[in-house]
Amino acid sequence: MIPQDGIRFAFGTLTALPVRVTRWDREAARAGMLCAPLAGLVVGLFAAALGGVLLLLGSGPLLAAVATAAVPAALTRGLHLDGLADTADGLGSGKPAEDALRIMKQSDIGPFGVITLLFVLLAQVAALTELYGQGWAQGAVGAAVSGVTARLALTLASRTGVPAARPEGLGAAVAGVVPVRAGLAVAALVTAGCAAAGALLGGYGGVLHQALAVLAGLGAAQLLLRHCVRRFGGVTGDVFGALAETAATASLIALVLVLG
């Protein structure tokens, strides 16, 4: 596998950046999902940069937080948020798997989706506001860590043993492509990298804070993944979007709680 194929797959499917996916086979999908945290890092850095620019121009932490939360939505064309809303509608419907999956494919958003979007975005903005209130560096690292954790959750959700709920779509393309050991190795590497970034902010305490934030995000995503597999019979593209938003939000909340 040429690494470039994996990078193209990761950025071409997980972001709206102008990257053309040249291969769409299982091997490319495996490399792409292993590279997913890299795409998350780029998204997080763009988000942190915009928040920093606004702070330099004199805005308060709230406006910087809103802009930071908006960047990942823009760089995915809202697909992860849409997946979150669709998954919430499917889970909230209480219907059998086949009917729930049909609800998720509909273009409209139901009440469960609207409510979930509202509270998730409010939680992200609130957490980022608190982090920016402590300084630009705290907010920037929080944005980067949440972006990386969101995509790392997708790497782990693509591991062997997690089935696809449908025979088509992104879920089917990446379901089960990542060997468990490879996924765990990437998770360990990413967690160590986030911990190292935390060391620059707060020494040993920062290391622990950032590592706990990553683990909290992954834990929340894993709980949702297990529930979705049980309810839908596997993963879909919408479920992947929901996992990303859940992991990002949980990691930000964890950062606020441990830093508070």
Image (cartoon, grey):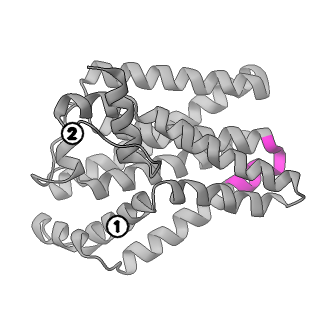
Label 1 sits on residue: 88
> Magenta segment: does it hold 31?
no
Tell me the kind of residue under disc 2. Trp
Q: In the rendered view, does 153 fall on the left or right side of 119?
A: left
Label 2 sits on residue: 24
Q: Along the line of sight, which residue is nearer the eye, 44 or 206?
A: 44
For mark 2, give the secondary structure: loop
Predominant SS of the magenta segment: helix
Q: In the rendered view, does 57 fall on the left or right side of 260?
A: right
Q: Determine whether 83 is above or below 187 in the image.
A: below
Q: Which residues are magenta?
A: 128-136
Is residue 122 visible in the rendered image? The answer is: yes
1 and 2 marks in contact (CB < 8 Å): no
**How many residues crowd mark 2 within 10 Å: few (<14), some (14–19), many (20+)?**
some
Is residue 216 visible in the rendered image? The answer is: no
Q: Along the line of sight, which residue is nearer the eye, 68 or 208?
A: 68
Q: Along the line of sight, which residue is nearer the eye, 252 or 74?
A: 74
Upstream in the sequence, badge 1 or badge 2?
A: 2
Mark in front: 1 vs 2: 2
At x 47%, y 38%, the residue is 39
Which mark, residue 35?
none
For mark 1, give the secondary structure: helix
At x 67%, y 26%, the residue is 197
Q: In the rendered view, does 36 fall on the left or right side of 131?
A: left
